Image: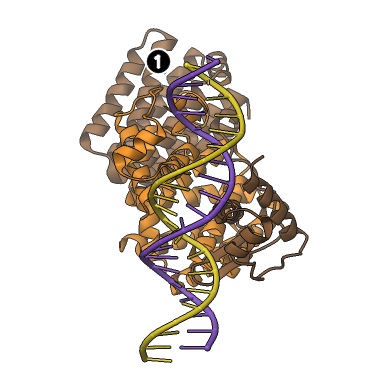
Chain colours: A orange, B brown, C yellow, D purple
Amino acid sequence: MSLSDHLCETWRQRLQTGQWRQGERLPTERELADTHGVSRTTVRKALAQLKEQGLIEQTVGSGTYVAQAPEGGVASPGTVRHTSPADLMEARLALEPALVDLVIRNASRDDLQRMAHCCEQAEQAQTLEAFEHWDAELHQAIAEAAHNPFVASVFQLMTEVRSQGEWGQLKKRSVTPERRLAYQREHRALVEALSDRDAERARALTLEHLVHVRRNLLGV
Amino acid sequence: MSLSDHLCETWRQRLQTGQWRQGERLPTERELADTHGVSRTTVRKALAQLKEQGLIEQTVGSGTYVAQAPEGGVASPGTVRHTSPADLMEARLALEPALVDLVIRNASRDDLQRMAHCCEQAEQAQTLEAFEHWDAELHQAIAEAAHNPFVASVFQLMTEVRSQGEWGQLKKRSVTPERRLAYQREHRALVEALSDRDAERARALTLEHLVHVRRNLLGV
DNA sequence: CTAAATTTGTCCGTATGTATT
DNA sequence: AAATACATACGGACAAATTTA
């Protein structure tokens, strides 16, 4: 974990615990650099992450401010932050098989082609990072294939949790080359079942895949 | 537009037009910096953008490689704001029966008592507003009975949508006294099934109730 | 198999530009 | 008009992983 990642984690905690409150102005970048004994470059990298997650806002000439969290814009209820990997897997096991029905009913040919494209790219990926990128893209493609804004935001919540601290660490440790191959096969099979509009098979494959992921991730 | 953004655009064109082909190795960062007359920092910022878009891959000690060319139209994440009543009902019909399993597995005796309490209060409510309050409380109680933070935030999303303009209007017009009585009976039956830990019956009752609500709400 | 060279990853210190106060 | 604060960029250094001699 890099210095900037570490700072990012530290500050995210302050934001979540309310040590830095909504609308409050943070210390200047130079002050933060000074108090933490790092360069301003490093501080900026950490702040950039927080900004991308919508937790802070920055204005030239003015300063860095804590973003208004719940009321406006992209909703991310605070409880999501407390979701552990085990919690998320439990919820995925319950929800995703149910969503398969929606996808099968509403997916267009374009949606299915996009999924297949994601599979191809994931298979050709040379690095773990690239693989995870296309894995995430595949999830997104499936989510959007439901053609339901609410379902889309549920998936977005999942993505948020997965892009958050603990999950990334766990995944890095758990994804071996053999497991990655297995995931690829399972993804392929699922996309095929979806293309065949075979709901029962798709549900079974989804469940199987998630059980597999959970075992690798949590050993349960 | 910053220097790094400009470089990013230039290189994206090369990637998309095939001047840099799949799998090909790009010049090293220092070479790119040299030929474009910029610092390595700037080159790295541009490459970071391309990497995030999945167009290139980087490996320490080896180099930067072309991952792919044509990107399928990646849509922006759907927000909850665009959820229509029909969208929400579709999602509820898919998700809530699935969540019943979680509730049955994880609900405590306190959770079930709280649900029963909500039913009583709803039945004794003298105004439509009071009824809707306890209806919402019942939903909350069921959500929290899953004892899963992620599930809780999904329910919170639902509540957000329902508290939002269009839904309230529709509900006001659709809830007649007879329908309210029917809802109360259905809620009671569901809480009983949950208390009996009878998953199959609870799922069926949930589905039945939601179909009922949808018909009253949308006429579908 | 080992050691050196290569290449990306991270960090620092400094300087200048631009918008706000 | 001056001070403040973020935005961008440069060059140098060392670490970590890979390739090559």
Q: Is residue A115 above or below residue D20?
A: above
| Residue situated in front as seen by the camera: A212 or A181 | A181
Furthest-left residue in this view = B109
The quarter holding residue B25 reads bottom right
Residue A209: where, in percent of width, then height? 46, 62
Judge by depth and name the residue closer to the eye, A86 or A126: A126
Tag 1: amino acid: Phe
Q: How many marks?
A: 1
State which chain disc 1 sits on: B
User: Regarding mark 1 in the picture, which secondary structure is present there?
Assistant: helix
Residue at image coords 28%, 44%: B106
The residue under the point 51% across, 42% down is A156
- Within-10-Å neighbours for mark 1: few <14, some 14–19, many 20+: many
The C terminus of chain B sits in image quarter: top right
In the figure, A133 relative to D7: above or below? below
Q: Which residue does the numbered mark 1 point to in the structure image?
A: B131
Residue nearest the observer in this picture, B23 or B113 = B23
Q: Quadrant of the N terminus of chain B?
A: top right
Rendered view: A56 above or below A85 = above
Q: Is residue B70 left or right of residue A40?
A: right
Residue B152 seen from this side: no
